[in-house]
Amino acid sequence: MSTYLVKEVFLTLQGEGAHAGRPAVFCRFTGCNLWTGREEHRSTAVCQFCDTDFVGTDGPGGGQFRGAVALADHVRSFWPGEGRGFVVCTGGEPTLQLDDELVEALHAHDLEIAIETNGTRLPPAGIDWICLSPKAGAAVVLDRADEVKLVYPQLQPEAAPERWIGFPAHVHSLQPMDGPRRAANTAAAVAYCLEHPDWRLSVQTHKDIGIP
């Protein structure tokens, strides 16, 4: 029986990408294969621009969960009402922990499952929405997704938008990189989308309205 390490679980509105504005329970797993999550390791990490704390199990709703049913029970408890719920499995990198048993348990709890992944590991079968966020310097093994959400700009050629517009996905979203150059990055992403209308702009609305 697997033990799942979860940084936090919370109800919010999805802030970015194709499902922006949709109520969702976020289940943030600990751990990532592209960065330890510790600042002293950022400069040598494959992904150096991550803005998320995924270290430890001490966040709101976080903890260690023995078995898929226990975690699915916990996630479902955050969804208001009795209708079908929506859970976003994220991290870190959720495919380090999300497995067939957990997918089955979440579906059994009447939860639609989305993941946000860097694409370097194959996810388990049965996930309802796969959002791929490729990172420069990390080889993607996925051959399809529902959405490509590319953080922009990443300076390496393998993370250029033209590299990913042909990747099989229903939606291609360009998301301005956060940080001190956020305004300039947003302007650049807007300009790129206007010149290349196969891309749509994804802004992090949760940060603008002050929700997690």
Image (cartoon, rainbow, N blue to C red):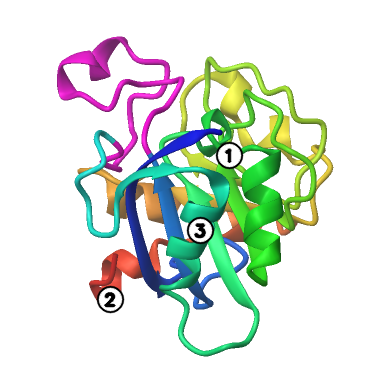
Residue 189 appearing in the image: no
Above or below, 7 relative to 84:
above
Residue drawn at x 62%, y 23% is 120
The amino acid marked with disc number 3 is Val
For the residues marked 1 and 2, what is the alpha-carbon distance in whole angstroms?
A: 30 Å
Magenta-highlighted residues:
30-54
For the residues marked 2 and 3, what is the alpha-carbon distance in whole angstroms?
A: 20 Å
The secondary structure that dominates the magenta segment is loop
Front one among 130 and 58: 58
Which residue is tagged 1? 98
Residue drawn at x 44%, y 38% is 4
Which residue is tagged 2? 209
The amino acid marked with disc number 1 is Leu
Above or below, 148 relative to 75:
above
Mark 1 / mark 2, whichever is N-terminal: 1
Residue drawn at x 64%, y 37% is 99
Q: Position of residue 10 (x, y in %)?
A: 35, 65
Are there few (<14), some (14-19), or many (20+) residues within 10 Å of tag 3? Answer: some
Which residue is tagged 3? 190
For the residues marked 3 and 1, what is the alpha-carbon distance in whole angstroms?
A: 34 Å
**Quarter of the image that includes the C terminus:** bottom left
